[in-house]
Image (tube, rainbow, N blue to C red):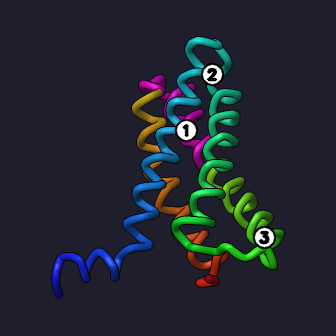
Amino acid sequence: MGFFEKIRKNRQILLYLVFGVLTTAVNVVAYYLFAHPLSLSVGVSTLLAWLASVIFAFVTNKIFVFEARGVAHIVYELVTFFASRVLTGAIDMAIMLVFVEVLCLNDLVIKIVSNIVVIILNFILSKIIVFRGRK
């Protein structure tokens, strides 16, 4: 199997990784802006960063990764996407609170590690629940 054939075969995963990195960047930058220049709490900053990154992720995942362009399923996709992101957002919040507030580890390092966990869970949930192979 040639290089380009491998890329075509794994297109969805590659695009998810690209947009996952961009979503992580949105999350980390938003968290930094809320937590540091604005001096909001870790919890509030994590929540606001989560909201910004979920909106970004929904649009990019729907259009580019899973190519779910129809409007017929948009309510289902929107509700299940946000519900799955609430779950992984709660996991992100728990990781941040335990490792930053309780264990006093570096907040930005933990934010990045937490995002790696969340990206993997989000792909699985989007693939098997939210967009379910619709095109």
**Callout 3: 10 Å neighbours few (<14), some, many (20+)?**
some
Identify whether 25 is placed above or below 55. Answer: above
Which residue is label 2 attached to? 34
> Real-space Cα distance between discs 3 and 1?
24 Å
Magenta span includes 92: yes
Q: Spatial distance from mark 2 to mark 1, Cα to Cα?
A: 11 Å
Q: Measuring 74% from the left and 58% from the top, which residue is drawn there?
A: 82
* Residue 92 x %, y %: 58, 45
**Rendered image quadrant of residue 2:** bottom left
Residue 58: quadrant of the picture? bottom right
Secondary structure of residue under mark 2: helix
Q: Nearer the viewer, mark 3 or mark 1?
A: 3
The residue wearing badge 1 is: 27
Q: Element type at marker 1?
A: helix
Q: Which residue is painted at 70% across and 28% down in the image?
A: 44
Whether residue 72 appears in magenta in the rendering, the answer is no
